[in-house]
Image: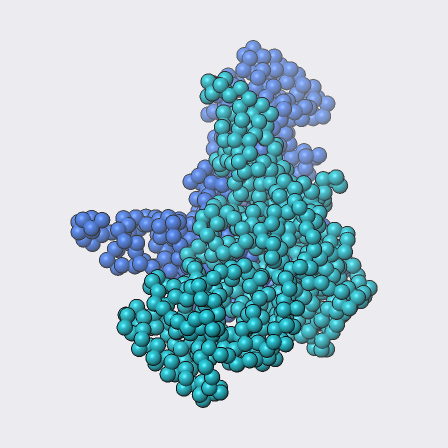
Chain colours: A blue, B cyan
Amino acid sequence: MLSLRHCQGLTRVSLLRTHRQAAVSPLLVCGRSQCTRWSSGDGSGGHHDSGPRYRPHSPGWSHVIAGLLAGTGAVLVYRLHRSQVEQAATNIHPIREAHSFPIYTQEEVTKHRTLADGVWVTYKGGVYDITDFVAMHPGGNKIMLAAGGALEPFWALYAVHGQDHVLEILSEYKVGELSPEDCKQQEASLSDPYSSDPPRHPALRVNSQKPFNAEPPPELLSDSFITPSAIFFKRNHLPVPKVDPETYQLEIEGLPGGPVSLSLAELKSRFPKHTVTATLQCAGNRRSEMNQVKQVKGLNWGIGAISNATWSGARLRDVLIAAGYTPGTVAQHVQFEGLDRDVTGTTYGASIPLRKAVSEDGDVLLAYEMNGEELPADHGFPVRVVVPGTVGARNVKWLGKIALSQEESSSHWQQNDYKGFSPCTDWDTVDFKSAPAIQELPVQSAITQPAEGSAVDRSAGELTVKGYAWSGGGREVVRVDVSLDGGRTWQVAQLQGGDKQEGPAEAPPLGRAWAWKLWELTAPLPEGAQELEIMCKAVDNSYNMQPDSVAPIWNLRGVLSNAWHRVTVRVEEEEEEEEEEKY
Amino acid sequence: MLSLRHCQGLTRVSLLRTHRQAAVSPLLVCGRSQCTRWSSGDGSGGHHDSGPRYRPHSPGWSHVIAGLLAGTGAVLVYRLHRSQVEQAATNIHPIREAHSFPIYTQEEVTKHRTLADGVWVTYKGGVYDITDFVAMHPGGNKIMLAAGGALEPFWALYAVHGQDHVLEILSEYKVGELSPEDCKQQEASLSDPYSSDPPRHPALRVNSQKPFNAEPPPELLSDSFITPSAIFFKRNHLPVPKVDPETYQLEIEGLPGGPVSLSLAELKSRFPKHTVTATLQCAGNRRSEMNQVKQVKGLNWGIGAISNATWSGARLRDVLIAAGYTPGTVAQHVQFEGLDRDVTGTTYGASIPLRKAVSEDGDVLLAYEMNGEELPADHGFPVRVVVPGTVGARNVKWLGKIALSQEESSSHWQQNDYKGFSPCTDWDTVDFKSAPAIQELPVQSAITQPAEGSAVDRSAGELTVKGYAWSGGGREVVRVDVSLDGGRTWQVAQLQGGDKQEGPAEAPPLGRAWAWKLWELTAPLPEGAQELEIMCKAVDNSYNMQPDSVAPIWNLRGVLSNAWHRVTVRVEEEEEEEEEEKY
């Protein structure tokens, strides 16, 4: 194998995609003055084997590897390749030395944003034609977000790129240098994109800093029916955008009358303010339990990627009708685009079925308030979508555009993420088209108290177990069963529908139970038990139940983790010896 | 204890409910000439202990029992009781001998239909005041269906009454004789109420003849996407009524404009004919699996209490709007009454939420056709309700009346049946008010082939597993996982949305997936296995999953049985000895 470790600045000579084999051929020369070498490695897969999930898809790739492993084939391949490169360069670019590169302006780079036009990116002043790498990118099509622009902000977003072998792969695709003026300008704009993220509450358990993803500790979660905004779980996909509420415009497209634009003031003044108490849950809530079965891809959420708040804003239905929607409007989906974007201008996006968006009892909001105050920056200031009963990922924050369409959002997060698969599906066999994008979530519950591994005092004689329960699609949780003995026997918990101080809330209208229920059970400690395996399972009003165990619902993205929640605690004996004599 | 075995015609002297204790006091004399005796029994609970579910609720009861068990107390209680009875009889009725009874007309009996007026019934010419027994009836309030009328048709419906001790309990409550004229008339009307039930297909597996309850064998079930009407599962609660289509009138009540009545011809001619393919499932489907965990109450259904048909009729929404319904109509529920009734005129009844009834995409039908033909007698001729996505029990057959109301149907089947409870809830603790009436059903699937306990030929090398999958509320089944190894590994089955001959159906509109999906998996036989534990589990588009096991969802009525379905088969070795050497 060829190895390029410890050789920064190494680049592939090939400027042209004459055929796929050339594109992936690891035949390289150094583009800088320090070194011009290529060497045979250890044959272990080398720098192209960047981890267990990295799989080259190009058929040509395996041929080249096979040739290289055959030994002498390497030189032949190299010569053939050089000849092709030089010939091609003669045809299209002015002839130049192998280690010098043409200078490109940012404008020229920006023209290369599609597979048809070629996909170019810049990195630290270099220009790279990564067209042939796109199909091989372990992160899939997301790489296209960077097309025509700088890699830095994306690599800053996705820390996995901060590894030597990634730089080595990139180096193969160098085709030029960025003009000094554009370099300077880029440097200015490529400061840490997260530098303007807001301050956060120290109680949050941070799963990822950039983008910011954090959950409240379980004991705080069940403390109040309404989760305080500061500790409401945060799930950002990109940096928090700074939006000026004075100049903010919400674009609405896809309606017969043509595009419409609304200022924040118009949104607030032209439409009735509607308030909904709704629980949001990340599809990845409780992913850590799936990781315990087998590694999945995604943030390692505990049980706290769920929270409940009061949201106020205009009803999406009202806004769409004002913008020209009628029952005859031909569309199946409503797409949302966030203002959180990367340097290429690509934004976070998602869609929901039109049916939900325009339903009178769908309660979809363009929310500008959370818990009675202006939306916090982390939750979508100045306007976010709140889609009650629907997975968090569709509740697009920092809303910039709404578009009615026949198709779902084409965003990565709608098409190739946030979908559920069989436990038998792995990254080699997954077909994202085969599964529906998650919208309504299944019934869920978890124990927030006592904490896993904690000790319970036997002398208290009884134990209080607390938790939350919720179901998607407006289905009301009607019962939570709790077991203190590993599922052998069950007891029915008390449900608390509303704020404890205000007493239990009235039953929500059928199909509009958007808020979770906190629950509590106080029960005698089982006699003689040294350890309790506490479990809970909820039932919604369609009598959907949670599955018993995690392994049979395991899926490669670790979403939809809603098996019975289990917590094991020790029972501490005050008079241990006496107790032991008894039993 | 007092025992009255082998003494037919014994009756209680007490005609009056002076206090509850008198009513339940087992002090009796014979009302006929043969015998006048009372005797002390074995103290085991005697004839009042009619089975494990029979629990006296009257506080007075336990006091009497306690007194009797104390021995000499019995004579004292008897003397006190006689004195009270005679005094009361003097006050209200002409004095007569203890073994003679007043004669009542049916008209007089019919006046006693409430606890306030007293609850009287007739049986074989005797008149019985069962007011004090109502609270003790093991079948609950259903006994009130017989108030003011004859017991015979109910006892014919519910075979559990055909036991000696039931007659003995009844005998305690005799208060009179029915007039000879009324006796004659009653005899004429009390012929077998099931005598006019239609003929049925011999392939059906009969769970109960009267009322008729039967399911198709599993292998026929998955034979066709549309279940032929003849083998569509039958779940009758009462005898099949004979309805004359010429005089049939559908009553509609509870709308501002007052009651409306529609003939069958009007229903067919005034409203567009709408066709829906919808699966109906009994709440008790797969109850037999719950019985294997612990005995439940109900018919012992296998996996066949589910079928799929094409239904045509008027949309309930259209009919309600024509009858005066507007979005402003104050009502929460739509009640349905069947024409299947007992001699008191009490009919089968159920209700659904108004929201479902009037929803544009609820697809609720007043169906007069099934699979392209006139509704068969067993399926509700001439008109039945079809509520797609909703438990069978709400799809009222032989529809007589529709009523909009603020309340759910007060019928036994809505209030005190067809609800789900925790596995910890038993007949002593159950509170039917604490659980919602089942409407939408949870996700379901079952294996129809191979059959439990059958043999699979190893030399075939592979195995085909077939089954059905469905979910309530219009949620589409998006995946079925099948395991051949007891749940250790899973494979994804092929779904068949429509009739095989017509090719796969188009995806149903979101939220309107009313029909089941048949599925199939052909997979290599696991090498060396002597036995296969085959399992299936379905996922709907809200990503609800089936629970793993039956015990944690067990409930006293045996409804909502939707754990993974399991079938165990033997693998037969063609060359058994050789195979055994190998493994």
Q: Nearer the viewer, residue A281 or B4?
A: B4
Q: Residue at x 51, y 18 (%)?
A: A1
User: Could you tell me residue A558's position as x and y percent?
Assistant: 50, 43
Q: Residue at x 53, y 28 (%)?
A: B571
Q: Is residue B339 left or right of residue B23?
A: right
Q: From what the image shows, is residue A239 above or below residue A504?
A: above
Q: Residue at x 45, y 48 (%)?
A: B293
Q: Nearer the viewer, residue B224 or A294?
A: B224
Q: Which image quarter: residue B460? A: top right
Q: Is residue A582 left or right of residue B319?
A: left
Q: Residue most toward the top?
A: A72
User: Could you tell me residue B361's position as x and y percent?
Assistant: 69, 59
* Residue A349 in sight from this viewpoint: no
Q: Residue most toward the front?
A: B34
Q: From what the image shows, is residue A31 above or below residue B436?
A: above
* Residue B494 in sight from this viewpoint: yes
Q: Residue at x 30, y 68 (%)?
A: B69
